[in-house]
Image: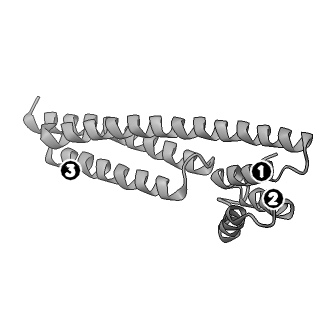
């Protein structure tokens, strides 16, 4: 085989390695954004890092040979994938914990509907989940029961200033 043919085969192989990995990580970031596991800012950072990995991979493919850039791009993409995987699953575990807290606060409210602290914690938990309408309702109820709470006023102001992510995510 000629050196030119070997170069073409090597470039095709590198493309076959880089493109699916980049596409998979991009899809992962995008779907995590859609299911509210990642915030838009976190997804933007992920896409910027992914763009840098793509650039390294493309430069390596164009230059030919694996060389330093090719190896660096592979290590970078693998590291980015592992960090993204751990972060996304950490966020999902955190979200599950917050949902469990919501159930706990709802149970407390069912037993004692005049418990201002339970409404306050419920509102704060909804804020952390980016469910701002539910947070507003809970914090307004907390302020009805304990109108002197400065903390609840701050949280209610925060809930009013922010809008829910994409508008389709409602919690039961």
Identity of the residue drawn at 47% across and 39% down: 87
Q: Which mark is residue 59?
A: 3
User: In x, y percent, where is residue 39?
Assistant: 55, 54
State the CA–CA distance, disc 1 to disc 3. Answer: 57 Å
Name the mark on residue 155: none
147 sits left or right of 124 in the view = right
Query: Between disc 2 and disc 3, whose residue precedes?
Result: 3
Toward which corner of the image does residue 160 lie, by quadrant?
bottom right
Please name whichever residue, 80 or 114, is drawn nearer the observer in this view of the structure: 114
- Residue 68 position within the rendered picture, expressed as x and y whole percent measured from the top left: 13, 40
Label ID, residue 142: 2
Q: Is mark 3 on a helix, strand or loop?
A: helix
Is residue 65 something one can see in this rendering? Answer: no
Question: In which quadrant is the C terminus drawn?
Answer: top right
Does 36 sit left or right of 171 as displayed? left
Give the structural element (helix, strand or loop) at label 2.
helix
Q: Which colour scheme is used?
A: one colour
Badge 2 vs badge 1, beta-carbon distance below 8 Å: yes
User: Of marks 1 and 3, which one's residue comes earlier in the chain?
Assistant: 3
**Residue at the disc numbered 1:** 117
Q: How crowded is mark 3: few (under 14 residues within 10 Å), some or many (20 or more)?
A: some
Residue closer to the observer: 102 or 165: 102
Residue that lies at the very extreme toward the front in this rendered image: 148
Residue drawn 59% across the image and 35% down it: 93
């Amino acid at each position: 085989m000629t050196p030119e043919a070997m170069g073409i085969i090597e470039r095709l192989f590198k493309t076959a390695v880089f493109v699916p990995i980049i596409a998979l990580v991009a899809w992962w970031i995008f779907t995590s954004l859609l299911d509210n596991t990642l915030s838009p800012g976190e997804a933007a950072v992920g896409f910027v890092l992914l763009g840098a990995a793509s650039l390294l991979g493309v430069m390596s493919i164009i230059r030919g040979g694996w060389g330093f850039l090719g190896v660096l791009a592979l290590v970078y993409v693998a590291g980015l994938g592992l960090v993204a995987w751990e972060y996304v699953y950490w966020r999902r575990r955190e979200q599950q914990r917050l949902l469990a807290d919501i159930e706990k606060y709802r149970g407390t409210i069912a037993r004692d509907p005049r418990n201002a602290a339970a409404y306050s914690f419920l509102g704060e938990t909804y804020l952390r989940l980016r469910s701002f309408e539910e947070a507003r309702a809970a914090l307004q109820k907390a302020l009805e029961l304990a109108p002197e709470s400065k903390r609840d006023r701050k949280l209610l102001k925060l809930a009013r200033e922010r809008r829910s992510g994409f508008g389709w995510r409602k919690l039961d």
